[in-house]
Amino acid sequence: MALFGNKQEKTYDTGDLKVPVSLGVIMDGNGRWATQRHLPRSAGHKVGAENLKELCRNCVRYGVKYLTVYAFSTENWSRPQPEVDFLMKLFVELFDKYDAELAEEGIRVRFTGDDSELPEKVREVCKTAEERSKDRPNMQLIVALNYGGRREIVSSFRKLAEKVKDGSLDPDDITEQMISDNMYLPDVPDPELIIRPSGEMRLSNFLLWESAYSEFWVSDTLWPDFGYDDLTQAFRDFAGRDRRFGGLSKKDSKA
């Protein structure tokens, strides 16, 4: 199956849209999608993985520069072992088998999370995918793998604590920017918009620090069915948001 082929041509007119430079997506609903069709959960994960490719295509066409997707959380290890094993195998297949087609779209692949708990084969594939895609210019696909927002914040604090311990940093000098600079991928802009399919109204430990001023958009569509129309509607709604960052709206500031 071609990564971006055999899809109906769509219109990527951004005239009435405000497309975020940095977008986060919580890919939720694979299991429910499969259950509704009397299929094993693994079938939902497989279709969901295929849908990630479609999301990448749409985001590149719209001009998104950073796409961070929540693939596997630090809490997902509690799922049944056969499901975890299937997901690990799926990650290897996805970023190994389809790299050439990702390259055609100019997509750079990066990973964020704690890789120390990942199987060796998964770590190898992640490293290879990052290395061979590092010069691709169109969009960065950041895959949150064994990722937890709280763990990332703890990691940043530990780095700063080491500097305090060795005397190179005064605790009173610690700033928000320092904390941001010690996150997993400090060069990636905070997401302007976070999308969650499946209708769940929570972050689930995704980008807790980075999402302080993110806009949220929730869809009842389950992730495997989330497509171009959903993404376009999310961007339309985002265009109508007034991002005040704690200040006044444009309308109120003129009053």
Image (tube, helix red, strand yellow):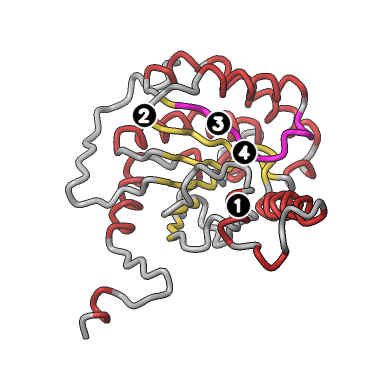
Which residue occupies 35% across, 35% down?
58
Q: How far apart are the alpha carbons under marks 4 and 1?
A: 11 Å
Where's residue 106, x and y in %?
39, 23
Residue 37 lies left or right of residue 2; in this view the side is: right
Residue 111, magenta (yes or no): yes
Q: Which residue is mark 4?
A: 112
Q: Which residue is mark 3?
A: 110
Nearest the eye: 223 or 41: 223
Which residue occupies 43% across, 57% down?
217
Which residue occupies 48% across, 47% down?
24
Q: How far apart are the alpha carbons under marks 1 and 2?
A: 24 Å
Q: How far apart are the alpha carbons under marks 3 and 4?
A: 7 Å
State which tag comes first along the sequence, 3 or 1: 3
Callout 2: 10 Å neighbours few (<14), some, many (20+)? some
Where's residue 110, x and y in %?
55, 31
Give the magenta part as a residue range.
Answer: 108-118
Q: How far apart are the alpha carbons under marks 2 and 3?
A: 13 Å
Looking at the rendered image, the disc whose residue lies closer to the viewer, 3 or 1, is 3
Residue type (three-letter) at the residue carrying disc 1: Phe
Nearest the eye: 12 or 147: 147
Residue type (three-letter) at the residue carrying disc 3: Arg
Placement of 85 over or under 195, stated as above or below: above
Quarter-of-image position of residue 38: top right
Q: How far apart are the alpha carbons under marks 3 and 1?
A: 16 Å
Q: Which residue is mark 1?
A: 206
Placement of 35 over or under 116, stated as above or below: below
Residue type (three-letter) at the residue carrying disc 2: Asn
Nearest the eye: 14 or 220: 14
Q: Which residue is mark 2?
A: 138
- Callout 3 touching callout 4 (CB < 8 Å): yes
